[in-house]
Image (cartoon, helix red, strand yellow):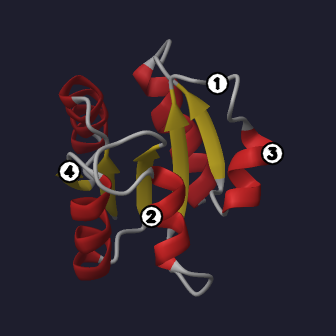
């Protein structure tokens, strides 16, 4: 399975990437929303992690550009959990919302696998 991680924080990308690689997933990374959207179009990943606030396109803007016919699941992430939660994430078009920072990266991995199941 293919996972795309779109976040301007290198530490977040690296942490998620290592967790998914350790479980045998193919992983690609993008540091901004514009590049993330390009990679989503070319890779057709099964799962996309999207930060809310990034240079270029924001997470919600990327979801809007993906359109309603997108394939794959989207997990929206934000350090500003007061503004976003599962309801607002789903209204935007995400499948799941995860607040940052993560308490346990393997809990995030488990939630993602449950979403894909």
Marks 1 and 3, how far apart at CA: 12 Å
How far apart are the alpha carbons under marks 2 and 3? 18 Å
| Above-or-below relation of 117 to 32 | below
Q: Residue at x 49, y 42 (%)?
A: 52
Mark 4 or mark 3, earlier in chain: 4
The numbered mark, 1 or 3, whose residue comes first in the sequence reads 1
Q: CA distance from mark 4 to mark 3?
A: 26 Å
Tell me, yes or no, whether the two marked residues, 4 and 3, touch with CB atoms within 8 Å.
no
The answer to whether 71 appears left or right of 11 in the picture is right
For the residue labelled by badge 4, is the local secondary structure a helix, a strand or a loop?
Answer: strand
Provide the secondary structure element on which disc 3 rests. helix
- Residue 86 rendering spot, x and y as whole percentages: 74, 41
Residue 109 is situated, as x and y percent measured from the top left of the image, at 46, 36
> How far apart are the alpha carbons under marks 4 and 2?
15 Å
Q: Which residue is identified by label 4?
A: 29
Q: Tell me which label, 1 or 4, sits earlier in the chain.
A: 4
Q: Establish if 23 lies above or below 35.
A: above
Q: Which residue has dot 1 on it?
A: 81
Gap in angstroms between the C-alphas marked 1 and 2: 19 Å
Query: For mark 2, does the 10 Å Cα neighbourhood hold few (<14), some (14 to 19), or many (20 or more) residues?
Result: many
Identify the residue at image location x=69%, y=30%: 83
Residue 67 is situated, as x and y percent measured from the top left of the image, at: 55, 81
Decide: marks 2, 3 in contact (CB < 8 A)? no
Would you name the residue on which mark 3 appears? 87
């Amino acid at each position: 399975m293919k996972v795309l991680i779109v976040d301007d924080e290198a530490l977040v990308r690296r942490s998620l990437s290592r967790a998914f690689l350790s479980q045998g997933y193919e992983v690609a990374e993008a540091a901004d929303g514009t590049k993330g959207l390009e990679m989503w179009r070319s890779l057709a990943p099964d799962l996309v992690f999207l930060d809310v606030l990034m240079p270029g396109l924001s997470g919600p803007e990327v979801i809007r550009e993906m359109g309603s016919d997108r394939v794959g699941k989207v997990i929206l992430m934000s350090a500003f959990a007061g503004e976003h939660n599962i309801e607002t994430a789903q209204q935007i078009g995400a499948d799941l919302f995860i607040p940052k920072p993560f308490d346990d990266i393997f809990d995030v991995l488990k939630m993602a696998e449950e979403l894909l199941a």
